[in-house]
């Protein structure tokens, strides 16, 4: 096949090619995770709670009531999430249940649901590569995506938390931003942004950057007026529809951590201002910049005056809970507080992406084509890189935003090495180019300086704290409310009929503090928590991460005494199998 014919083939078959990549990788991921699917191995607290929320919905809980009544009963735990990510999971359960039975239908629903945002994300990434790099660049973008070690796990089977959907919507918003058809691109970015905000506010900063870039396109060129008009209308209207359809009863109050009247008013005002700016006859770029800046300043001042309580962190937790819990969440820590190996894996692809964007900008300056879009993506990617030094929870988005730049790097390096007349540089250079563009170059120092091997402790046959089999003896006990660390409670309510007290969810600060205080405090304080929630059992998993936050290192704390086999006389040990990771006491 000649180079021209190859280019035409890749250009004409990008949709079927992307679909084939998605299908092949989806099948491989499902095959690799079959044991986990069979064991319903939802590894993350949020994945477990998402399934608990879906079960409650299918069990008849009202649409607008997102309270999790299996935590802190009878009042329940206020959950700030949206029903939107629940829909595909619930739909798959209902579709598969007549064929597989309820238990198997649930397992396959949580396995298949993450593959839907994975498909949307892949198609959006392919579109971005075609529009900003070259029509035949989409296979390189696919390769960079599959090598994104922080991004890809968000789309793995069983990863049913909402982050996969938000990342897919961010990719769609970027695809709209670089769409050469202004009105279509603006509407695409606006709808994707509205859907992401309906799901949650985690991508708010990145979506704000997309909106700012959209406005700056208009400042630069008045012919972009259809873009900001379509974007503003889709953003404001979409957010209003999303709020009406999906905002829970709790989120219809003036809360700061979800799409509530607070953020709906800001988004609707921003959308209306953009539509207004689009219709004004402003022919001078300086006039457009000045009026646009004035509109942005008015929006910011209005927000500050109307919602001063939402100018800080949206979680709004107490200083004590922030010190005990939020500041110790690993993903909420900056890059420089991570292990260097993890930090390098996070940084590698964004660094490759920034290098590729620099090459792309240089090329666009020479040709005069696509420079504005290239600069916009570079600025957003650079901002995402900087945000890693605030919190590494932004790492999946940073890797996603680096993929177009990494594709540019690959398209620059690969043809040069492939053109060599000698086999060694042709093969070796191509492999080096692939390692550079995908960020896999980071593996070299990690292999060269491996982590010290940990000394194996305990019985290798002991189950882990999250395994399905570990909960079988717990599930066999009469249903009760169980006091357990907050990271174990979501798994407990999914794997058994028991209730918990608190999970790691910021709106339930009082219950979380009761758990911390009960374990950290004296026997009397532990008994106070037990009586307040009608606790029937206390469950610990020795060796689980974060035990130090409960007072393990304080010999006087209840947690340390329980861990040391010195329970109070009102707790009766419950016998568990020898391979159980748990210790359990019944409250007398």
Image (spheres, rainbow, N blue to C red):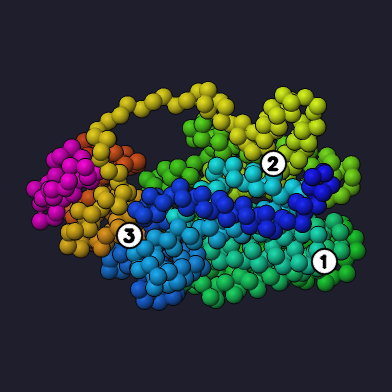
Marks 1/3 in contact by CB < 8 Å: the verdict is no
Above or below, 419 relative to 395: above
Q: Earlier in the sequence, mark 1 or mark 3?
A: 1
Query: Residue visible at 72% across and 60% down?
Result: 176
Residue 300 is labelled as none
Seen in the image, is 365 located left or right of residue 397?
A: right
> Is 587 inside the magenta-drawn segment?
yes
Q: Which of marks 1 and 2 is nearer the N terminus?
A: 1
Marks 2/3 in contact by CB < 8 Å: the verdict is no
Above or below, 321 relative to 348: below
- The residues bearing labels 1 and 2 have C-alpha atoms spaced at a distance of 31 Å
Crowding around mark 1 (Cα neighbors within 10 Å: few <14, some 14 to 19, many 20+) is many
Tell me the magenta residue range: 562-588
Q: Mark 2 points at which residue?
A: 406
Query: Residue visible at 17% across and 59% down?
Result: 477
Q: Name the residue under label 1.
A: 225
Image coordinates of residue 489 in percent, x first then y, are 31, 55
- The residues bearing labels 1 and 3 have C-alpha atoms spaced at a distance of 50 Å
């Amino acid at each position: 096949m000649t180079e021209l014919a190859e280019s035409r083939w890749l250009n004409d078959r990008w949709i079927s090619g992307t679909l084939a990549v998605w299908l092949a990788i989806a099948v491989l991921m499902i095959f690799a995770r079959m044991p986990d699917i069979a064991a319903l191995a939802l590894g993350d607290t949020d994945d477990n709670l998402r399934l608990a929320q879906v079960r409650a919905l299918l069990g008849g809980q009202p649409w607008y009531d997102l309270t999790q009544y299996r935590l802190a009963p009878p009042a329940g735990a206020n959950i700030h999430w949206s029903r939107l990510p629940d829909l595909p999971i619930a739909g798959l359960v209902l579709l598969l249940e007549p064929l597989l039975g309820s238990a198997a239908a649930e397992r396959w629903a949580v396995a298949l649901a993450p593959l839907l945002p994975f498909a949307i994300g892949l198609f959006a990434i392919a579109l971005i590569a075609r529009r900003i790099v070259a029509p035949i660049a989409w296979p390189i973008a696919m390769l960079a995506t599959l090598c994104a070690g922080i991004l890809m796990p968000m789309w793995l089977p069983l990863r049913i938390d909402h982050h996969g959907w938000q990342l897919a919507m961010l990719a769609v918003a970027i695809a709209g931003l670089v769409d050469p058809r202004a009105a279509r691109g603006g509407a695409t970015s606006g709808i994707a942004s509205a859907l992401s905000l309906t799901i949650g506010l985690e991508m708010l900063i990145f979506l704000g950057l997309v909106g700012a870039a959209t406005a700056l396109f208009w400042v630069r060129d008045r012919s972009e007026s259809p873009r900001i008009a379509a974007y503003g209308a889709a953003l404001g209207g979409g957010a209003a529809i999303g709020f009406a359809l999906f905002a829970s009863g709790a989120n219809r109050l003036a809360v700061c951590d979800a799409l509530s009247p607070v953020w709906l008013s800001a988004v609707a005002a921003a959308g209306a201002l953009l539509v207004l700016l689009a219709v004004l006859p402003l022919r001078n770029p300086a006039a457009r910049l000045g009026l646009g800046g004035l509109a942005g300043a008015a929006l910011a001042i209005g927000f500050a005056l109307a919602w001063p309580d939402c100018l800080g962190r949206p979680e709004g937790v107490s200083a004590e809970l922030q010190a005990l819990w939020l500041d110790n969440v690993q993903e909420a820590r900056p890059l420089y507080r991570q292990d260097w190996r993890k930090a390098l894996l996070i940084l590698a692809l964004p660094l490759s992406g920034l290098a590729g964007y620099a090459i792309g900008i240089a090329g666009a300056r020479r040709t005069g084509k696509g420079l504005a879009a290239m600069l916009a993506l570079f600025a957003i990617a650079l901002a995402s890189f900087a945000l890693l030094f605030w919190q590494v929870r932004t790492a999946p988005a940073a890797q996603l935003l680096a993929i177009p730049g990494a594709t540019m790097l690959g398209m620059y390096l690969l043809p040069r090495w492939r053109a060599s007349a000698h086999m060694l540089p042709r093969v070796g250079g191509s492999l080096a180019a692939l390692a550079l563009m995908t960020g896999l170059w980071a593996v070299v120092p990690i292999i060269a300086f491996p982590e010290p091997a940990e000394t194996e402790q305990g019985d290798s046959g002991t189950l882990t704290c999250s395994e399905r089999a570990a909960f079988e003896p717990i599930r066999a006990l009469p249903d009760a409310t169980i006091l357990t660390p907050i990271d174990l409670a979501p798994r407990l309510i999914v794997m058994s009929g028991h209730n918990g007290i608190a999970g790691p969810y910021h709106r339930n600060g009082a219950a979380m503090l009761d758990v911390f205080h009960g374990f950290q405090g004296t026997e009397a304080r532990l008994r106070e928590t037990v009586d307040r929630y009608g606790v029937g059992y206390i469950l610990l998993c020795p060796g689980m991460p974060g035990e130090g936050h409960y007072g393990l290192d304080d010999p006087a704390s209840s947690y340390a005494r329980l861990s040391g086999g010195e329970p109070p006389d009102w707790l009766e040990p419950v016998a568990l199998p020898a391979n159980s990771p748990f210790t359990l006491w019944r409250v007398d």
